[in-house]
């Protein structure tokens, strides 16, 4: 079992983080410049030393220094002595660098299908109607076995569904051309922000984030997010997708002695701003259930009220740096924050929040029974790694020595929806051309036989003679029936007249003979 980790202390006690309860999640909050980033670095170092991999987003570009050992200086040594804090072991952590744009680290990609319509709708800022159309497109692609891997696949499928709207209406519902057009425009905007680099293959293997080095230290995965933050929705949805992938792929482990992975979500308020209800429910579900996969999540933001109550209630380990109370709104936020922390009889939490110095914090961690400990006012320990960014040369050395080097750098474009729909359109065009050619050939052949045949077309003279013959001698109808001519009718009339006269004479003789007797 991993030993407790001291992360802060004051004159009378030490605040220890229990590794087996680190997957009960936590949060690091405080105003800008109060020490949140250094606290994050202290926790990341502690997890790495115990053999737990870490993932964190480098929003400001100053976390890569964790890969290098810090150099002691007189100012830092004086602070440690004055606050009675232990001198750290000066060493760096094993690091893997990642970057959605592939510039400052290994590229990170996901497929469109894996992202799904809900997260993609959030990324594209679609309304309910447009989200419904996008969901329909994903469903049609699944039913027809079309792979949606990159942006061009999604564009091709959107166009295909729009073209077949009448055919698909009875099975899937109406497809509005206006909605499809709006989605296409949003995709264009996303592409201009660099989103096309994110969608494709090879897709990130989550297990590459859960590695240890040859010394048993957990790898610290740092995502370069300074450029990604220019597209806040893409940043938030990407991190949420990572959490969802961890939940889907990792097996159940219950409560291990230490987490399998610790995930730091910096600028966490971006995840919840204007989030629709369906997305908030998904976030709550992932946070609640990913604990059983051995994953701990620490949300890093300026104020706890940025996090919905349903999520905040699941964060057991709390580190609160100073907040400012210059406006009535700020004062209300301070009161709300103080009410979310466990009371301490000897500490005015609301007053202390506004009095904390840089590197000082109010800390409440889970105890052996899993209950939040009383809130204590303490100083955070100093990290043993460098505070600040690594140099370009140091970054290049890290990438060159990476165990996943070369695995994601080359893109793969295999056959998917775009190629198959293109081939289908080509085949349909060729078939239509073949049918048109065959029809033209048949028409020309029929015309030639009419002009070159043995039977000459009827003339006017032949027509008159045929009519006279039919009039005098009769004709045969189309169904084989016989129609009498004038001559046949005259003969039959004479025969009927003679026969009638004979019969009348015979009958008259018979009747007359009887009367005479």
Image (cartoon, grey):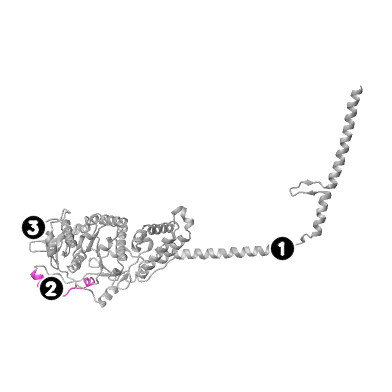
Indicate yes or no whether the magenta region holds residue 210: no
Read off the residue under disc 2: 76
Residue 218: x %, y % from top left: 23, 65
Q: Specify which label sits upstream in the sequence, 2 or 1.
A: 2
What's the distance in space between the residues labelled 2 and 1, CA to CA? 105 Å
Q: For the residue carrying disc 2, how many other residues have a C-alpha within 10 Å: few (<14), some (14-19), or many (20+)? A: few
Q: Which mark is residue 449?
A: 1
Comparing labels 3 and 2, the label whose residue is closer to the camera: 3
Comparing labels 2 and 1, the label whose residue is closer to the camera: 1
Quarter of the image with the C terminus in it: top right
Read off the residue under disc 3: 346
Q: Specify which label sits upstream in the sequence, 3 or 2.
A: 2
Against 364, residue 485 (above or below) is above
Q: For the residue carrying disc 3, how many other residues have a C-alpha within 10 Å: few (<14), some (14-19), or many (20+)? A: few
Q: For the residue carrying disc 1, how many other residues have a C-alpha within 10 Å: few (<14), some (14-19), or many (20+)? A: few
Rendered image quadrant of residue 432 = bottom right
Residue 177: x %, y % from top left: 44, 61
In terms of secondary structure, where does tag 2 sit? helix
> Which stretch is magenta?
63-82
In terms of secondary structure, where does tag 1 sit? helix
Q: Specify which label sits upstream in the sequence, 1 or 3.
A: 3
Indicate yes or no whether the magenta region holds residue 74: yes
Q: Nearer the viewer, residue 75 or 403?
A: 75
């Amino acid at each position: 079992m991993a030993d407790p980790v001291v992360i802060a202390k004051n004159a009378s006690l030490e605040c220890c983080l229990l590794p087996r309860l680190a997957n009960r999640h936590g949060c690091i909050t405080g105003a800008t410049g109060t020490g949140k980033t250094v606290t994050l670095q202290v926790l990341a170092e502690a997890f790495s030393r115990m053999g737990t991999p870490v993932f964190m987003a480098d929003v400001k570009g100053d976390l890569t220094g964790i890969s290098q050992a810090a150099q002691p200086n007189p100012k830092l040594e004086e602070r440690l002595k004055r606050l009675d804090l232990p001198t750290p072991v000066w060493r760096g952590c094993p690091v893997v660098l990642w970057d959605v744009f592939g510039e400052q680290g290994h590229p990170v990609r996901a497929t469109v299908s894996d992202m799904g319509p809900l997260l993609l709708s959030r990324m594209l800022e679609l309304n309910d109607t447009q989200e419904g159309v996008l969901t329909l497109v994903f469903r049609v692609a699944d039913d027809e076995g079309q792979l949606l891997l990159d942006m061009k696949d999604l564009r091709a499928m959107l166009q295909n569904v729009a073209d077949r709207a009448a055919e698909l209406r009875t099975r899937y519902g109406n497809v509005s051309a206006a909605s499809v057009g709006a989605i296409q425009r949003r995709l264009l905007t996303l592409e201009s922000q660099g989103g096309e680099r994110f969608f494709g293959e090879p897709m990130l293997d989550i297990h590459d984030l859960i590695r240890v080095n040859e010394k048993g230290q957990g790898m610290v995965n740092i995502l370069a997010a300074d450029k990604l933050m220019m597209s806040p929705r893409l940043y938030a949805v990407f991190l949420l997708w990572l959490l969802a992938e961890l939940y889907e792929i990792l097996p159940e482990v219950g409560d291990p002695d230490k987490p399998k992975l610790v995930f730091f979500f910096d600028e966490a308020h971006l995840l919840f701003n204007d989030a629709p209800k369906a997305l908030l429910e998904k976030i709550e579900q992932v946070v609640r259930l990913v604990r059983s996969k051995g994953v701990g999540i620490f949300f890093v933001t300026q104020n706890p009220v940025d996090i919905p109550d349903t999520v905040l209630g699941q964060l057991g380990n709390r580190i609160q740096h100073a907040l400012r109370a210059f406006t009535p709104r700020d004062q209300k936020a301070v009161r709300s924050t103080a009410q979310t922390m466990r009371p301490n009889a000897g500490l005015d939490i609301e007053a202390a929040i506004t009095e904390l110095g840089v590197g000082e914090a109010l800390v409440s961690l889970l105890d052996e029974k899993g209950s939040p400990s009383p809130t204590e006012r303490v100083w955070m320990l100093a990290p043993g790694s460098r505070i600040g960014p690594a140099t370009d040369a140091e970054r290049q050395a890290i990438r060159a020595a990476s165990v996943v080097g070369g695995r994601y750098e080359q893109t793969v474009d295999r056959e998917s929806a775009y190629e198959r729909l293109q081939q289908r359109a080509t085949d349909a065009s060729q078939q239509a051309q073949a049918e048109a050619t065959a029809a033209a050939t048949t028409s020309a052949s029929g015309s030639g036989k009419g002009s070159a045949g043995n039977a000459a077309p009827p003339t006017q003279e032949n027509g008159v003679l045929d009519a006279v013959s039919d009039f005098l001698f009769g004709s045969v109808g189309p169904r084989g029936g016989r129609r009498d001519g004038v001559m046949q009718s005259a003969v039959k009339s004479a025969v009927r007249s003679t026969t009638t006269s004979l019969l009348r004479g015979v009958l008259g003789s018979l009747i007359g003979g009887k009367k005479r007797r």
